[in-house]
Image (spheres, rainbow, N blue to C red):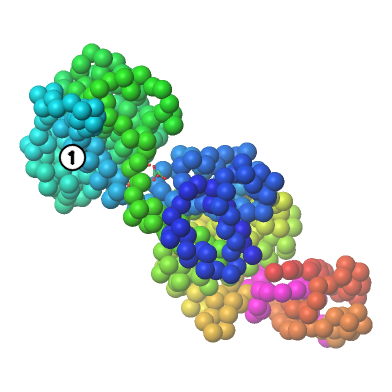
């Protein structure tokens, strides 16, 4: 049973797929209302009200995934989530149209003074001269941040006959041309625009982007809009430029501190405000809730998510292709870690054959997570494996080769320990399964699963019988047995799969047989 805490308000219809599952229990309560149960939850769904801090993550040791029903994840400590092995996903495009429409509605309301006129008429006045506005047609619109929302705003602006100038350091000329906008420098946008709207995330670079220095570069009488994140337009600087009359008006949906409370900006008649309503439509809320619900369902079923903030993104199609290698790699990591139960400095994964053409980053992370799992007390998974490896001084890398060891695909693993280098090769054979075809330098062929017993011995007659006798005497049934050797009479290995885990004393009895160099229990 998976328990999901939905701690902010969310569309019921969007959550419906989760409710249908008999494996899932949904609790819709604020974090403060379930303080004593926080350790029970596997998933947490939020909008922007819940702050997902390190402190909260520590209280939720079972948490595996945080779903943000929206775009901005600034209410989530993503680094802390990564450290805790918690996947963070968002719903990147479910509210794009609503927010672009809200921006446009705010722009029209701002230049036509609709909110002010509305209040006036509601106060039983009829003062037509007081509310003369401006047309949008023919005006220069500056868009800072040309991602999903910025580009939707541009389409609407062009339909209104506006001239659109765009600043986005990550925007290519081709994409801009396709959308009929002019790419500019920030200074050009500031100097050219009659109206400026910001659509970037809030980052170190964008915090205070429209501050005193840049506002001074804008046209006198400029209108400003912020329906992205509070703080991109510096509120102190905005107050100053409203006071001195340089800025003709501002439309704000977001604020440095929310809820806004009593703020000096509210005393300006030419500042219009909404309480972070960009995504507040029935449609957007249904879209974002449905998107995160579907992703969480996928994740809890062990499938990869497509809109993760702290994992490489993976489409369903790509996952379908890598799935078998992903599992094989995890098993190889688990096996290698137990076999090399000494400090290691470096892990190299080499891909050959059909697997080399796939998205190997995910496969490598899976192997690394498998390797670290037996060594790390805290949760380790594909999300935090790279970070934990780094913390423990283990470097890792990927290589590609043409040597498939005679198979259609081959994953080779090399682990460098203090005085030992361990190698293993695995392959996935459709309809047959995962096979380890080389182990510690020996050619062999075994399935990496269950209770395994590895024995390295001298190649001489009677060894298999002696091992069989000891196991039989201790009521341990051998399910399969594979052997390999370097040369006749030299070093040889056996890999046995057993029907139950081996007790330590049986292992010791086996070692005492003689002619056995190493005997190790391995569990996959
Ligand atoms: N008011 C509301 O209710 C909502 C607000 N938002 C916010 O709107 C903003 C934009 O969202 P999307 O368009 O979906 O994001 P997006 O990721 O599609 O677009 C952001 C764009 O900003 C650009 N950018 C990043 N740093 C920049 C910089 N220093 N200067 C100029 N451009 C820069 C990026 O290249 C990207 O193209 C985000 O802050 C998001 O949180 C989103 C949905 C609802
Ligand atoms: O959940 C909301 O309504 C806020 C949406 C938002 O700001 C976002 O998606 O970034």
Ligand 1 lies in quarter: top left
Please say whether residue 376 is one of the residues in the magenta stretch.
no
Q: Where does the image place residue 284, in percent across and percent down from the top left?
A: 35, 52
Image quadrant in which the N terminus is located: bottom right
Q: Which of 154 and 284 is in front in this view?
A: 284
Q: Nearer the viewer, residue 296 or 77?
A: 296
Residue 221 drawn above or below residue 374: above
Q: Where does the image place residue 227, in percent across and percent down from the top left?
A: 31, 37
Residue 444 drawn above or below residue 283: below
- Residue reaching furthest to the top: 244
User: What residue is disc 1 on?
Assistant: 183
Instruction: Please indicate, yes or no, whether residue 213 appears anywhere in the rendered image.
Output: no
* Residue at x 39% of width, y 47% of height: 71
**Residues drawn in magenta:** 438-462
Instruction: Please indicate, yes or no, whether residue 522 appears anywhere in the rendered image.
Output: yes
Badge 1: residue crowd in 10 Å (few <14, some 14–19, many ≥20): many
Image quadrant in which the C terminus is located: bottom right
Please say whether residue 450 is one of the residues in the magenta stretch.
yes
Question: To which quarter of the image does residue 266 belong?
Answer: top left
Q: Where does the image place residue 19, in percent across and percent down from the top left?
A: 52, 64
Residue 176 drawn above or below residue 339: above
Q: Is residue 175 left or right of residue 400?
A: left
């Amino acid at each position: 049973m998976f328990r999901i805490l939905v701690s902010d308000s969310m569309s019921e219809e969007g959550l419906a797929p989760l409710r249908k599952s008999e494996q899932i229990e949904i609790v819709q309560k604020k974090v403060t209302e379930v303080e004593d149960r926080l350790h029970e939850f596997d998933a947490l769904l939020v909008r922007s009200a819940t702050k997902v801090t390190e402190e909260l993550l520590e209280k939720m040791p079972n948490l595996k995934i945080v779903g943000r029903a929206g775009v901005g994840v600034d209410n989530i400590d993503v680094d802390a989530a990564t450290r805790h092995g918690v996947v963070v996903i968002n719903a990147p495009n479910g509210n794009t149209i609503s927010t672009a429409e809200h921006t446009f509605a705010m722009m029209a309301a701002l230049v036509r003074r609709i909110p002010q006129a509305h209040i006036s008429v509601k106060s039983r006045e009829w003062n037509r001269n007081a509310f003369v506005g401006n047309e949008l047609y023919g005006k220069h619109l500056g868009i800072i941040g040309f991602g999903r929302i910025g580009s939707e705003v541009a389409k609407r602006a062009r339909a209104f006959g506006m001239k659109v100038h765009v600043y986005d350091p990550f925007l290519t000329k081709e994409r801009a041309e396709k959308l009929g906008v002019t790419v500019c420098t920030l200074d050009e946008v500031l100097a050219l625009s009659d109206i400026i709207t910001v659509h970037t995330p809030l980052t170190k670079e964008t915090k205070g982007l429209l501050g005193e220095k840049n506002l001074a570069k804008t046209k006198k009488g400029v209108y400003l809009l912020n329906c992205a994140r509070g703080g991109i337009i510096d509120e102190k600087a905005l107050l100053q430029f409203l006071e001195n009359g340089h800025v003709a008006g501002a439309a704000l949906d977001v604020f440095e501190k929310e809820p806004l409370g009593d703020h000096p900006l509210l005393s300006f008649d030419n500042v219009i405000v909404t309480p972070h309503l960009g995504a507040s439509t029935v449609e957007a809320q249904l879209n974002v809730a449905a998107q995160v619900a579907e992703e969480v369902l996928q994740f809890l079923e062990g499938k990869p998510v497509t809109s993760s903030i702290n994992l490489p993104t993976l489409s369903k199609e790509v996952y379908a292709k890598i799935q078998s290698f992903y599992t094989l790699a995890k098993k190889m990591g688990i096996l290698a870690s137990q076999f090399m139960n000494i400090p290691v400095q470096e892990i190299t994964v080499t891909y050959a054959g059909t697997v080399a053409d796939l998205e190997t980053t995910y496969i490598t992370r899976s192997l690394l997570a498998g390797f670290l799992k037996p060594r790390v007390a805290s949760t380790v998974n594909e999300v935090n494996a790279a970070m934990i490896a780094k913390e423990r001084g283990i470097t890792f890398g990927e290589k590609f080769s043409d040597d498939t060891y005679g198979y259609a695909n081959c994953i080779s693993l090399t682990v460098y320990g203090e005085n030992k280098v361990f190698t293993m090769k695995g392959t996935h054979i459709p309809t047959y399964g995962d096979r380890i075809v080389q182990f510690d330098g020996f050619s062999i062929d075994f399935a990496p699963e269950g209770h395994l017993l590895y024995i390295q011995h001298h190649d001489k007659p009677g060894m298999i019988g002696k091992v069989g006798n000891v196991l039989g005497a201790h009521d341990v049934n051998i399910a399969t047995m594979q052997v390999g050797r370097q040369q006749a009479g030299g070093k040889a290995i056996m890999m046995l799969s057993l029907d139950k885990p081996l007790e330590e004393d049986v292992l010791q009895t086996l070692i005492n047989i003689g002619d056995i160099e190493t005997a190790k229990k391995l569990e996959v």
